[in-house]
């Protein structure tokens, strides 16, 4: 009999890719305030439920799962301070509601809370989990608050939780405004690209590789509980090198207007995460070929 996995906020880009990659290994239930019915008709064995996760709890008559992955969050690079209330609701309140609902369930082996590599701030790449965080945006600050809350729940109440800090995810089903889908779409249409100087480096990870890593953490749950873990490629590439690689693969005639858009205030110029802790927990080296995965996506 398959172990039960709940994906909270699982109807978005990451959740749907986790379903695609893990549905044959786990009995998956998806809870979200919006359900992409068209997508999930292709996965008849996956249960879906509409729920306002920051307001309501999963009904008490629903049996506890073996694992929970909490993806629920508003993701934004904006520095707008007015976003705090909505981000606290979509992060901290959801976590606390889930804790209250499942805190007495001994069957739960691992609760994976999503943090962000942006919690680290600008300096010190490659980022290690022991480093002091210096978030530069409301999003990153709320993520750090939620991470600290998760660790408190483990320390004080022995809740089987961990925090995953992903690299920059990309892959199938991602929204067209995100960097890699935007670049590929413009290049395929031979349309001009308006971008920053693109000297900043990012640690990208393909959705399939990320799903594999999550699966390995679930399998090694006894070593993962209570930990903060980077899940990324461990390498960083400049955005310019990614654009030029895609342009070559597609053989695009697009004009790339480097510098047409200014850097964000306090722009992080090199985001690279150490994956040594991930390797220790799952007991094997992590080697992902990001450029090859971009070619697969193209």
Image (spheres, grey):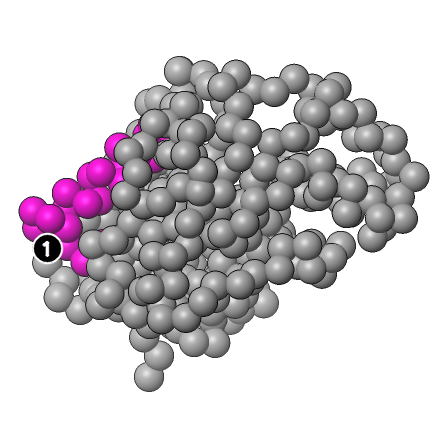
Residue drawn at the location 8% of the way across and 50% of the way down: 157
Residue 9 vs 240, above or below: the answer is below
Residue found at x 51% / y 28%:
268
Number of on-image labels: 1
- Lateral position of residue 22 relative to residue 175, left or right: left
Give whichever of 212, 68 is nearer the camera: 212
- Residue name at image x 42 percent, y 54 percent: 275
Towards the viewer: 206 or 21: 206
Magenta residues? Answer: 139-161
Quadrant housing the C terminus: bottom right
Is 264 placed left or right of 241 in the picture?
A: left
| Residue 219 visible in the picture | yes
Residue 257 sits inside the magenta stretch: no
Looking at this view, is 58 or 164 the one in front?
164
| Left or right: 124 as drawn, with respect to 103 | right
Q: Is residue 121 above or below residue 278?
A: above
Judge whether residue 157 is colored magenta.
Answer: yes
Q: Which residue is mark 1?
A: 158
- Locate residue 114, reporting x and y percent: 36, 46
Q: Nearer the viewer, residue 150 or 199?
A: 199
Main secondary-structure element of the magenta-colored stretch: helix
Disc 1 element:
loop
Query: Looking at the figure, which quarter contains the N terminus?
Result: bottom left
Residue 59 appears in the figure: no
Residue positioned most to the right: 253
Question: How far from the left and from the top, in percent, is residue 233?
Answer: 52, 54
Q: Residue furthest left?
A: 156
- Give the percent coordinates (x, y) of residue 73: 40, 39
x then y, percent, for residue 240: 71, 36
Q: Residues within 10 Å of mark 1 (few under 14, many from 20)?
A: few
């Amino acid at each position: 009999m398959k172990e039960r996995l709940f994906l909270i906020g699982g109807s978005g880009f990451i959740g749907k890719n986790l379903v695609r990659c893990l549905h044959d290994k786990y009995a998956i239930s998806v809870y979200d305030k919006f359900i992409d019915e068209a997508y999930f008709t292709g996965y008849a064995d996956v249960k879906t439920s509409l729920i306002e996760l920051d307001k309501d709890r999963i009904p008490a008559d629903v049996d506890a799962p073996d694992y929970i992955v909490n993806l629920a969050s508003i993701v934004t690079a904006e520095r707008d301070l007015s976003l705090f209330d909505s981000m606290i609701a979509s992060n901290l309140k959801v976590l606390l509601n889930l804790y209250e609902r499942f805190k007495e369930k001994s069957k739960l082996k691992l609760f994976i809370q999503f943090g962000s590599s942006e919690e680290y701030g600008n300096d010190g790449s490659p980022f290690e989990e022991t480093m002091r965080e210096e978030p530069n945006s409301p999003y990153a600050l709320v993520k750090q608050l939620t991470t600290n809350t998760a660790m408190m729940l483990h320390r004080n109440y022995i809740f089987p939780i961990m925090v995953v800090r992903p690299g920059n995810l990309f892959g199938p089903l991602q929204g067209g405004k995100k960097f890699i889908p935007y670049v590929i779409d413009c290049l395929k249409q031979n349309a001009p690209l308006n971008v920053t100087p693109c000297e900043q480096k990012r640690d990208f990870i393909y959705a399939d590789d990320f799903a594999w890593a999550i699966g390995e953490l679930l399998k090694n749950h006894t070593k993962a509980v209570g930990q903060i873990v980077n899940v990324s490629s461990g390498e960083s590439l400049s955005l310019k090198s990614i654009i030029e690689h895609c342009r070559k693969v597609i053989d695009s005639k697009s004009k790339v207007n480097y510098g047409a858009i200014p850097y964000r205030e306090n722009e992080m110029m090199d985001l690279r995460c150490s994956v040594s802790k991930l390797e220790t927990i799952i007991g094997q080296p992590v080697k992902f070929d990001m450029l090859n995965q971009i070619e697969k996506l193209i």
